[in-house]
């Protein structure tokens, strides 16, 4: 039987509600619901929050009626791990009495009976009123019954705003409707915000070479250094340069062809160094204020020890051979996909535990972030088991899903536990595409559990305006990635504007580093290094750029000018970005800013300080003029300040 008060469409939640929504420590999280009942009585509602398994609610936040029966409030979590949020609603009898009595008195009706009703309502609430304001309520009760005074005097005492404030939010016993709890998983701040830098250790002379470069990477403002697989590489069917089938004796092969006689997923490629070198690299990254993220690729080369020791963990063809990976027409003869559902239940349990133990092994060496290769080609059930299994032991551990796949599959991976997700940003290039996509990511239902990470390029993907693109194309895509969402990353070579695709139809790089070594300079600043350093500094200084929810796009008449704002949780930090999407021509436009959303006056002047150039402009009104020449600047990152 339904309760009298209906509480529907609660957020934050995942589509099924079986998995927790996501938050980060200190982040403001909106809790909202549709709340209504029969009749015309006024309602009140609140959100309660606590650590799962504890008895005491550590937060009780009033929900505000937004209109159309939608209610909302904000909670914050400080501890990592499992939490729960509950929404409660009840009939606010005193607020209803107050509203109706004001209307009746204003219409000249006799309200003598209403005065006694108000007194009785306040009497019932008085024991639960805050002790400092209890006498105020008692005085109001006495005044409502003071027959020697005029009705107007008695009425004013009962309708006093201070009295209403004293009893607001008091929950009447036995009259509360409580919605089912909403589970919420709380991560550390890096789950929401960070700048990633990907490089291949073998091109840097091994792990010791990476360690030498960490100070330079930190100077550019990066937070996470992501390494492709560091394990031994198989020799059977090893790929040559540009993914050719014939590898020469000196060809290094793909790091994703994991496993050889030297070991599998818990071994280091001997050319990269020792575990002492690995541990030293992790320690140096920490000393530089960064973290090492490691690739977690659940696949094997034909030479992986698992192929010999656990044949049931692989797919066998009718001719007795093991099936290699394919994405027709592409073939990956150097990789065997894993069969996560072997017929023997004991084999499945052993396999899943072995995959979990890989994570535990590298966590033991200080790794707290994993970039997961192609998680959509593994069972959802496996991720729904292994991620909570790991995070129950260590809630610091984060998982980035590299899944350029169908939207619902990407969303499901996020729902069952992935901390962040690669996105379609690489293929969103027009003004309309970008605005619609980021609005969906930052304000749609998936924002409750799916955190995007924008990458303009990866070792596999060179797309859009970057293909044979100019430095201006690389600059504009960098500004977009770094300012549209809190987390973004680049693959080494981006700062050098490497722009040569494999072919007109192939999105991969020509001479891909997946199959050969790359010798790039560290001695001189790359062309984009100053812009990277500036953007990462801006991101760290501005809380508005560290928040996912609430990105707002502002209209403009030019289809090559994209304007959007990001505002901090408290509204104090307001950032307006304006980007020219045309890498070849100067563009100009007149913007239409929503000044109310930006917390600015429609009539008073305000400052627009460009964090990229240092220039400050004084604007007044909602229609500033902008002009951007891609040969000079890809965009503006304005800090808007009132009171110019």
Image: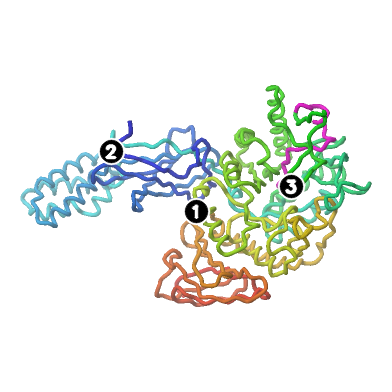
CA gap between label 2 and label 1 equals 34 Å
How many other residues sit within 10 Å of disc 2, few (<14), some (14-19) or many (≥20)?
some
User: In this picture, is 584 found above or below 415?
Assistant: below
Answer yes or no: is residue 608 visible.
yes
- Whether pointer 3 and pointer 1 mark residues with C-beta atoms closer than 8 Å, the reply is no
Residue that carries the numbered disc 2 in the rendered image? 172
Q: Residue at x 16, y 51 (%)?
A: 101
Residue that carries the numbered disc 3 in the rendered image? 283
CA gap between label 3 and label 1 equals 38 Å
Query: Which corner quadrant of the image does residue 141 belong to?
Result: top left
Q: Position of residue 161 (x, y in %)?
A: 24, 54
How many other residues sit within 10 Å of disc 1, few (<14), some (14-19) or many (≥20)?
some
Question: In the image, is 500 to the left or to the right of 553?
Answer: right
Query: Which corner quadrant of the image does residue 518 belong to?
Result: bottom right
User: In this picture, is 347 found above or below 265?
Assistant: above
CA gap between label 2 and label 3 equals 56 Å
Q: Nearer the viewer, mark 3 or mark 1?
A: 1
The earlier-in-sequence mark between 2 and 1 is: 2
Q: Residue at x 61, y 70 (%)?
A: 580
Residue that carries the numbered disc 1 in the rendered image? 443
- Residue 300 located within the stretch drawn in magenta: yes
Span shown in magenta: 293-312
């Amino acid at each position: 039987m339904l309760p009298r008060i209906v509480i529907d469409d609660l957020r934050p939640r995942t589509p099924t509600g079986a998995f927790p929504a996501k938050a980060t420590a200190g982040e403001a999280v909106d809790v909202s619901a549709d709340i209504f009942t029969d009749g015309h009585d006024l309602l009140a509602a609140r959100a309660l929050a606590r650590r799962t398994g504890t008895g005491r609610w550590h937060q009780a936040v009033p929900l505000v009626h937004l209109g159309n029966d939608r209610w909302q409030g904000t909670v914050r979590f400080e501890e990592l791990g499992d939490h729960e949020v509950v929404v409660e609603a009840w009939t606010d009898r005193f607020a209803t009495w107050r509203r109706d009595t004001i209307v009746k008195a204003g219409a000249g009706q006799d309200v003598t009976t209403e005065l006694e009703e108000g007194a009785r309502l306040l009497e019932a609430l008085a024991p639960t009123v805050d002790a400092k304001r209890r006498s105020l309520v008692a005085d109001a009760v006495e005044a409502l019954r003071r027959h020697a005074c005029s009705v107007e005097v008695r009425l004013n005492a009962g309708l006093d705003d201070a009295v209403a404030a004293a009893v607001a939010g008091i929950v009447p016993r036995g009259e509360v409707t409580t919605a089912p709890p909403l589970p919420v998983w709380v991560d550390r701040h890096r789950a929401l915000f960070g700048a990633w830098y990907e490089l291949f250790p073998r091109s840097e002379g091994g792990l010791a070479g990476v360690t030498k470069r960490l100070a330079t990477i930190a100077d550019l403002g990066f937070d996470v250094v992501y390494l492709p697989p560091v394990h031994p590489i198989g020799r059977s069917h090893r790929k040559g340069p540009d993914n050719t089938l014939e590898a020469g004796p000196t060809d290094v092969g793909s790091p994703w062809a994991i496993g050889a006689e030297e070991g599998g997923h818990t071994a280091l490629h001997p050319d990269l160094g020792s575990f002492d070198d690995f541990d030293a690299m992790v320690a140096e990254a920490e000393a530089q204020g960064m973290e090492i993220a490691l690739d977690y690729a659940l696949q094997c080369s034909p030479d992986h020890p698992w192929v010999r020791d656990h044949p049931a963990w692989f797919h066998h063809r009718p001719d007795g051979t093991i099936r290699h990976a394919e994405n027709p027409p592409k073939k990956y003869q150097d990789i065997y996909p894993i069969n996560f559902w072997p017929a023997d239940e004991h084999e499945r349990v052993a396999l899943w535990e072995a995959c979990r133990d890989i994570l535990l092994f590298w966590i033991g060496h200080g790794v707290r972030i994993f970039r997961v290769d192609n998680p959509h080609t593994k069972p959802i059930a496996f991720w729904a088991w292994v991620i909570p299994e790991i995070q129950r032991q260590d809630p610091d551990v984060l998982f980035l899903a590299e899944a350029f796949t169908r939207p619902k599959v990407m969303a499901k991976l996020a729902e069952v536990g992935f901390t962040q997700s690669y996105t379609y940003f690489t293929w969103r290039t027009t003004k309309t595409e970008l605005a619609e996509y980021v609005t969906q990511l930052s304000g749609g239902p998936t924002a409750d559990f799916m955190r995007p990470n924008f990458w303009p390029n990866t070792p596999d993907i060179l797309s859009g305006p970057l293909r044979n693109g100019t430095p201006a194309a690389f600059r504009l895509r960098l500004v977009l990635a770094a300012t549209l969402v809190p987390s973004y990353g680049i693959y080494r070579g981006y700062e050098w504007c490497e722009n040569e695709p494999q072919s007109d139809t192939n999105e991969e790089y020509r001479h891909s580093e997946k199959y050969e070594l790359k010798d790039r300079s560290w001695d001189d600043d790359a062309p984009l290094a100053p812009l990277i350093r500036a953007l990462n500094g801006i991101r760290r200084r501005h809380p508005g750029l560290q928040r996912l929810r609430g990105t707002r796009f502002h209209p403009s008449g030019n289809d090559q000018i994209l304007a959007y704002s990001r505002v901090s949780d408290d509204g104090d930090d307001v950032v307006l970005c304006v980007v020219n999407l045309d890498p070849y021509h100067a563009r100009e436009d007149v913007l239409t800013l929503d000044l109310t959303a930006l917390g600015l006056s429609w009539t008073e002047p305000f400052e627009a300080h460009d964090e990229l150039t240092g220039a400050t402009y004084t604007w007044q009104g909602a229609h500033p003029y902008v002009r951007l020449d891609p040969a000079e600047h890809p965009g503006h990152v304005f800090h808007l300040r009132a009171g110019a």
